[in-house]
Amino acid sequence: MPQTPPFSAMFDSSGYNRNLYQSAEDSCGGLYYHDNNLLSGSLEALIQHLVPNVDYYPDRTYIFTFLLSSRLFMHPYELMAKVCHLCVEHQRLSDPDSDKVMNQIRKIAPKILQLLTEWTETFPYDFRDERMMRNLKDLAHRIASGEETYRKNVQQMMQSLIRKLATLSQYEEVLAKISSTSTDRLTVLKTKPQSIQRDIITVCSDPYTLAQQLTHIELERLNYIGPEEFVQAFVQKDPLDNDKSCYSERKKTRNLEAYVEWFNRLSYLVATEICMPVKKKHRARMIEYFIDVARECFNIGNFNSLMAIISGMNMSPVSRLKKTWAKVKTAKFDILEHQMDPSSNFYNYRTALRGAAQRSLTAHSSREKIVIPFFSLLIKDIYFLNEGCANRLPNGHVNFEKFWELAKQVSEFMTWKQVECPFEKDRKILQYLLTVPVFSEDALYLASYESEGPENHIEKDRWKSLRSSLLGRA
């Protein structure tokens, strides 16, 4: 069975040319190059360039880049239909000699199978579309009608794809179940106060263990994000496409959105755990506990959990607890805040991320391979790359230079998300992190005011309003 190489081997510094506006004199079949780097081309020429023939197989970097970026111009189903048509055309010869035809089919079949394998392995979610699956099966059937080896390879490819899609469906069912059972903590406290007598420290007293369990959740959720979701989040109608409906109407970014929701949940969980305790010393202890968790997340390379924890501790209901913070040794927290300082476009964080990425490349253990980026910033970077460069050049050609850069960023993420978590799972801790009720923003403010009273008229008015609306008290 053909196997695709790791993503880390796909892009290097020479994968694209940064001199976007230099003249590109070399052209070949509607594709324009500069210093042997593909700069632009018509959409049809780029599709032709994707499809193998007897003497040609596209570079894997090109396959990934075009399959990723083409959805800015057409639905994957439309691309699949064109690819199938071209593959069938390439199997035909005008020469009536049947032996020559069979010889050509034998030469091109493994290349077509390799292309389909790369597509189904890297973008399996495309094939949740019944039309995509139908075209895939039709083309696979043509290949399998040849030699026995092809039949076995096609069967392996299809079985692997079906397993991936089944696993995705199970994961989405779990997410839906967690979402449907989520309850506001204040509601639970009012109806069943005895059901939430535990806090995070009673469930997991060791901050290092909690950091490891957070890393489990991060890597699992990262693993289900398809590379195409980064592009589909920003898809808009192609200005040269006058007839077809906009693909953004059908875009699917559920796994990406679920990961962002997890970040928000973790931030609110941190704030809830800090605001819950009645006694000041217990709140201070909880803050110091989360500082230690955050520091271990930094050491692991789990920057997303790190930033979620810092965000939770910087929420207004927490940061206003001045008497509580006065009891906290904040030196370690100050260092962490410095590392994630947003100034200079997150320069300190980006430096730390590069260090973690370099460590991952030369890792001798699974733990050293972990790189979990601050996800919202990654999304922001890809968004500004997409917005900052046109998809098409003035002559109507596809701006492929932009898509080299886009694919480079996404492929690095693809490498990171495939890392296996080396830490042992603790299901009790994971269950708590994923399902324990958390306070809403209003409930957090109310708990904060109850712990340390309002300091001005604005806070006093808000406190009275919250007590009335949330507790039914005057």
Image: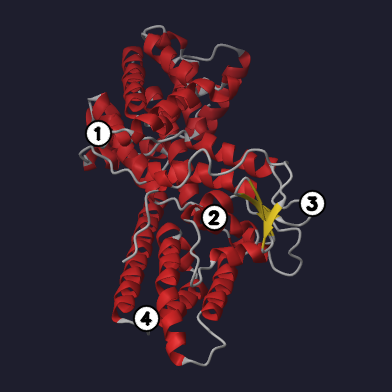
Quarter residue 412 falls in: top left
In the picture of the structure, the residue carrying the numbered disc 2 is 68
Farthest-out residue, right: 394
Nearest to N terminus: mark 1 or mark 3 = 1
Query: Could you tell me the amino acid type at mark 4?
Result: Ala
- The residue at the point 32 percent across, 72 percent down is 153
**Residue 244, percent across and down?**
70, 68
Nearest to N terminus: mark 3 or mark 4 = 4
In the picture of the structure, the residue carrying the numbered disc 1 is 364
**Label 2 – label 1 distance at C-alpha:** 31 Å
**Label 1 – label 3 distance at C-alpha:** 49 Å
Q: Are marks 1 and 4 in contact (CB under 8 Å)?
A: no
Q: Determine which of the numbered discs, if any, sits on residue 144 in the image.
A: 4
Picture layout, residue 197 above or below residue 99: above
Q: Are marks 1 and 3 in contact (CB under 8 Å)?
A: no
Quarter residue 204 falls in: top left
**Label 4 – label 2 distance at C-alpha:** 27 Å
Q: Is residue 89 left or right of residue 22?
A: left
Q: Determine which of the numbered discs, if any, sits on residue 26 in the image.
A: none
Query: Could you tell me the amino acid type at mark 2?
Result: Leu
SS under mark 3: loop
